[in-house]
Amino acid sequence: LAPTPSMLPASTIRSLGQKEYEKRKHAALEVEALVRELREAGQYEKINSVVKQLATELAQSAQANVRKGALQALSGTAIGLRGGDVGPMLPQLLPPVLSAFSDPDARVRYSACEAMYNMAKVARASCVVHVNAIFDGLFKLSADTDVQVQNGMQLLDRLMKDVVTESDAFDMDAFMPLLGERIYVSNPFSRQFLVGWISTLESVPDLDMLSHLPVFFDGLFHMLADANKEIRQQTFSVLSDLLREIRDAEDVSYAPIVNVLVSHCLSHDRFTRLTAITWLHPLISHAEAQMLPFCAQVLDAVLASLSHPEEEIREAASRADVTLRDLIHQSHDAQFEMPTVLHALASHLSSQYVPTLLAALQWTHMLLRKAPAAVMEQAPQLWPPLFRCLCNQSEEVVRLDLEALARMVPDASRLRPFCGHLLTLLREERSILERRGALIVRQLCELLEPSNVFVTLAQGLTEEDDLDFASQMIQSLNLILLTSPEALELRVRLKRSVADPGGADLLRTLYPAWCHNPASLLSMCLVAQAYEHAACLISQFASMEITLPFLLQIDKLVQLLESPIFTHVRLHLLEPEHHPHLLKTLGGILMLLPQSPAFHTLQARLASVPELGVFRLALEAREWSSRSSPQGLDRGTQGLDRVLLDTGTAAGSKAGAAGPSAPGAPGAGFVNPPALDFVILLSTYREVQRAHEARLLRQAQRGAGAGG
């Protein structure tokens, strides 16, 4: 064929615009033959003219058939050039083909795929220079709705992947930003296309995908939530390959990896969250010290997943939690930032989920053992959430929480503010006091020195403004003091308070706080064998309002009198002549009680007092009375009941009875040690009770005002 001034014969141009595919194909073969002849003749300028005519006049025609013919002719041109000659022509050949990828006509787009396939097959390695432009075109076609176009795109896609993997000239640094710009696409076909390219590039040993991981790593995790199961599986497979590569690599930048994993550990999609949390365990095991700068972020993500409804997620989080905790435990303090770790812990110590709370408390224990000084510096940050943990329903949480709190009270200087926080919590959350108050105090006594705990709490309650809370708290503390094994040492000291300065000091310290609850104060005096003062207190009860709660406490005291705790008190009843005030105290309790089982129990106990001892007491009382007054003989013969109620009357009505008994009086051998001044103690009791009476009066007035 002799070329025309337009380089293409008119008949060829007409045939390229025909509707029939075979006619266009025949015309394209004519163009291929023409280009081959021109190439063999070395007339490359004329070839440029042919390409220019096809690219400008025909490829941009308004008629779809002409555009299809132009694409077929451009494909034929590439075939006619062959081998090394096609590479230099690609800048002219590719633009019209790539532009046709966006053609409104699906048949034109398919023809573009076919033309591009033929060009790439001929050019092979020469296409690598233009891979970014071709990749962009393929990405657009990946979302095409036409089935035939999709098939053509997939054939071209596979060919381009082969070309890239075979080439040494592929510019990874220039290509990856292009992929990263498209990684968050939502179209499922486009996602499959991108995952396929990542998988292909990752399989090439000479290509360093890890250095470009931040570009596409987050996007892959977003794809795990795709509705298409096949996409999820493909993405998971790629991520698994990447994880293996990370574990085999020596130099990895973990910061972007951790940031992505942590964010997706909180994903609402189950599969995404499971994959992210599963990555953490092998990553921590492999990276070890390199993960320490990010331990706070990882800890935050792990603790949040420990209470997930899905068992697989909980198990994966548990593995990561144990691995990270071991890593921190074995590390040096300088390798991680303690404040950030404690901040993460503090946020999860307020969790409503028990597994998360238990893990956070275990972390707190580990850090307290590892670096107590560093943790104590952050105590103000940790105490509020730790105290809130005491509200939890789980006893295991409360136990671990109290152990952690106790570890944070290494000396008396910190015990007072600690107890202040505890009292504030119990005051504001009365339900905790009722349900857990005893458990909390007992645990503290087990972990700390019981006397320090009781003394500090008592000092705080002495200054308490909420008198109702103080009374309720003392009732709880008193029951612990009387019954719990943890308070055994305190009971032993109190029993010796009338003879031992140490026990007397304990009684004197606890006394002002116990004044808030008369029944509790009475029971403590009985334990301390301060029977004379107990009898004095009984006489004071006559002036107070006897309420049902008070009677219930007295009823409880009678039950306790029958328990092993008060064995020494019951044994003292064998010697009434030595303990006359004990008889008066128990008789007074009997008079306070209504006719109830407790009344009959105590009455039976008093009836078992040896008559001989009572007779001796009566004789001693009569003898003492006769020496004290000429009329004493008459008073001393008024019977056993009079003896039980009158012995020590002066002690109940006069301040002098708060001190030692008069010489020669019944029980005069049992005197109060100098450390205890019961006159002052009784004055304290009266002052506290006046405050309670004023409170009750105000409440009554408010109630009357509201009723009016």
Image (cartoon, grey):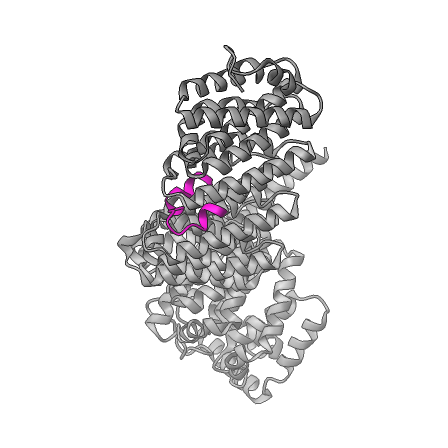
Name the foreground residue: 296 vs 76.
Answer: 76
Image position, residue 675 (x, y; %): 33, 67
Q: Is residue 519 visible?
A: yes
Image position, residue 139 (x, y; %): 55, 33
Residue 436 located within the stretch drawn in magenta: no
Name the foreground residue: 300 vs 158.
Answer: 158
| Quarter of the picture holding the C terminus | top right
Extreme top residue here? Answer: 5
Name the foreground residue: 438 vs 286.
Answer: 286
Extreme front residue here? Answer: 2
Q: From what the image shows, is residue 234 above or below residue 170?
A: below
Please count the marks in the image.
Answer: 0
Image position, residue 109 (x, y; %): 62, 27
Q: Residue at x 61, y 63 (%)?
A: 553
Residue 206 located within the stretch drawn in magenta: yes
Q: Magenta region: which residues? A: 200-216
Q: Residue at x 71, y 21 (%)?
A: 19
Q: From what the image shows, is residue 76 above or below residue 2?
A: below
Q: Is residue 686 visible?
A: no
